Image (cartoon, coloured by chain):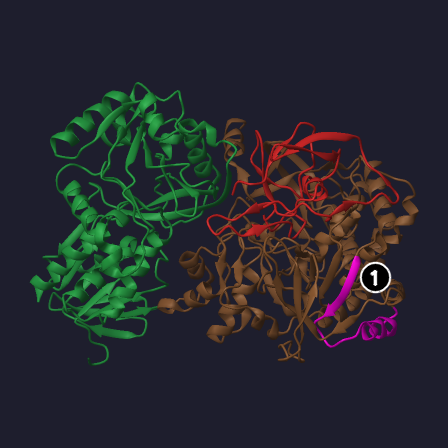
Chain colours: A red, B green, C brown
Amino acid sequence: MESRNQLPIRLDSNVERGRPVQIAVDGEPIEAYEGESLAAAILASGRRVFRHTHPEGQPRGIFCGMGVCYECLVTVAGRERVRACIVPVEDGMRVTTMIE
Amino acid sequence: MAPGKAEVIVIGGGVIGTSVAYYASRRGYKVTLLEKEHISSGASGACGGTVFMQTKNLGRHLELALKSAALYRNLAEELDFDIEYSVCGGMIAIENEQQAPIVQHTVEQQRLAGLAVDILDIKEARELEPMLGEHLCGATFCAADAIVNPFRVNRAFCRAAGRLGANLRIGVNVIDLVVENGRVRGVLTGDGPIYSDCVVNAAAIWAPALTKKYGYEPPITPHRVQVLITERLLPGTLRHILLCGCYLTAKHHPELLDMKERQHRLAAGLILEQGTTGGLVIGSTRELVGVDRTTTLDGIEVVAEHLYRVMPRLGPVNVIRAFAGLRPRTPNGMPILGAVESLPGLIMAAGHGGDGISLAPITGQLIADCVATMN
Amino acid sequence: MREVELVIVGGGPAGLSAALEASQAGTEVVLIDEYSTLGGQFYKQVPDSFRLKNPNAEGEQYVEGVGLIERVKNSKIEFLPNTLVWSVFPDRTLGLYREGRTEEVRARKLILAPGAQEVPVPFPGWTLPGVMMGGAAQSLLVRQRILPGRRVVMAGVGPLQLKVASQLLEAGAAVLEILEASNHPPVSMENALRSMGHWGKMREGMRYWMTIKKARIPFRHSHVPVRALGKEQLEAVVVAQVDAEWRVVPGTERTLEADTLCLSYGFLPSLQLTRNFGCRLEFKPQAGGWVTWHDADQQTSVEGVYVAGEVGGIGGADVAIEEGLIAALAAIRALGKAGTNGNAKKEREARKRLAHASKFAEVAGSMMHLKPGLLDLITEDTIICRCESVSAGRIMDAIGAENDFTLRGVKIQTRAGMGPCQGRMCGFVISRLIARKQGVPLDSILMDTPRFPVKPIPLKALVDYAENK
């Protein structure tokens, strides 16, 4: 159900990212940089499906990109479910995408 | 049928009104239901779906509830509409030692009256309902408690009544009764009079206003309940409908409540369910503020606090909405059902308090009986 | 509870403009934004921890934003990032949620500049990952430096998508086609702008147009996406030609293999805060429909509450900047802090610029008017309420059932609007579906009662709020 292919990549032109941080998505460590949105890190890891609706099982991902549509909800251990497009990554974040 | 005339008029498009319309139509009566806004525009659109037996007063109240529950069991099939009814069982959380003896006593009385209720220690309770906080003393368990979708119940009654010939007139405001020589002869609406010798007053908090000037004022007072809704959680996060023990304290030993505490000032008691789509419906306060459906910070906080005390693991859950409903309560908690002696032609079906959903089916059936007796 | 002279909600062009003006005059200013950086949707910025090798290479708009944000940093403005205004109370009191905690602040004067959202236009398959708003693609590019997709189709109406297409091209994406729903080729907008003396906008537009032309990207006016196809994510987009009313011309469907579809159908003011305050609205179809009414000083019907920018009517950044300035000047005056030097002149000039900018806004607004044919893209199975997965079929059945044509009634029957987005993605279309089915004007459809939380907050935050008082 993951979408691991060539899609979204990090662009380097004209930018140096912040320091790398350790985050895990669905148990797997992924590349992330301080200050990035969680959505950006997730997309850059090749995942476009952020969740599936229950019970219909429809795949959903980024839609509005500005925190109003609540499609990009992910669970962050120890916190409420958050909008990945709004929330910056933090060192040690453990994120689950698969729960509705 | 001549225009402006009906066999039976039902005032109110909440679950009570539509239930009466259905059961009366099923008996062959030509029913005209009058609703001033839209179906479920009042309390029936601002509620949860708990069908508790444990909260009913022993005697007539519990008897009605059990009969209603029996009707619920076949209702979906009968109305050909999925009302999402499930006999999931209910639990009353015993929060502290003060509540324990009160709960104990209540359960003993319930058992004597024939309602099977168990008292579980916290370990057993958490096996049934893992979200309960470890620090609680225990909980009751009653297998007969159930859950239903209140919006679907109302639609189901509406559609079935319509199929049986009932005339549902929405957007029609009943301004007054038509009374001649002390008898009710119909109603006066914004669109003119409609005549009938049998008028059912299912107007909930508006019921007294209609009859007051004719010397009958049923003791129905609006009580505001404030409710929170959460985001969807995995199915089975809550497996039962729930209540807190302080509800019983407030009911049986209000003198033990410390009125300085905001929780008690707002008469807040926790009532909790997980809807079919997964969101939690968390209630509620019980406030005397007249006809006021504003949600207040005090009210929302007190409900949130209470839930958090009983289920601390739900702390990170997002609250996505809050709303308020007005419950038509009577002093003894019993609905007012039946013909009004001082106003022949009028049948009351109002004052259900927070039991509207639980008692809708039996109310419809009883009032249909009343209609038959009257005619 | 903390009381502040001037609280400004929203750090976009309007909020920045207002904050800088007020702060300059010595007013205590707290500037609140839900996001981590200032700039709003117009001055999108990279995160603070990223470093731009050559900021000037980012273009005029970016650099303008940097400048404004620098000025804020060097001022006494207190910026509260990552802060959600989740509730409003009488007396201009705001409930805030930030850093996992809640707090309250009371504003002596309040400027609400929460901006706008993009118009959600449903069609079959629009919920597939890969279908996103144009602004989302732009945010990923400009803020996060992420390429949102490899094979992109652009769709919508008006000039914004030319800009995003151009940005995508420069970043290395393949833009397959740009679909413009109206029958206005971009050249007619340029003519309109030139005739009004909006040289800057015209030059900007021409620049994007040149980039697109150079890359030989097909620009098709009178075209819309009609279906998004794919299993777990977008794989192809079916596009078709439309007539003048945007109704699909039969037999013109074509399928494009794409992994990304960007939708830019215009903007809607974000009215939740102003509605919760009880501010009067007015209906202005060319400015985004319902907008917050305000007087010439930007004050709403609620005393001490001002608005600036899109929330008062979609007008773009230039309008927002001037309105922010005017609102600040009015608020400062009301606070009794207005010095006499220069303000009258400043205000006069701002109003002149506002009038000029408003003309552009009107032109843009009229060209971005959505035609009824868009509603015909919706089929029985098209999801309208995304949060609750409610289909158009269910909604259409509910509209008018038991004679109930209210939004609230549809909500109760179908659950549409009961999810976490609180109707932000579905209200627009459901209102139109009701108006069309009932045969009534759009502005007669009443919205549901505004309540808090304005956006979801965790239960624990409500509990902590209570405990901290």
Residue A60 part of the magenta segment = no
Q: Nearer the viewer, residue B243 or B247?
A: B243
Span of residues in magenta: C174-197
Is residue C17 visible in this depiction of the protein? no
Q: Position of residue C91 (x, y in %)?
A: 58, 43
Q: Is residue C194 above or below residue A86?
A: below
Instruction: Give the residue furthest to the top.
Output: B97
Q: Amino acid at mark 1?
A: Arg
Is C446 left or right of C193, judged from the image as shown? left
Q: Position of residue B330 (x, y in %)?
A: 23, 45
Q: Quadrant of the N terminus of chain B?
A: bottom left
Q: Position of residue C302 (x, y in %)?
A: 60, 52
Q: Quadrant of the C terminus of chain B?
A: bottom left
Residue C176 part of the magenta segment = yes
Q: What residue sits right under mark 1 in the picture?
A: C353
Q: Nearer the viewer, residue C340 or C189?
A: C189
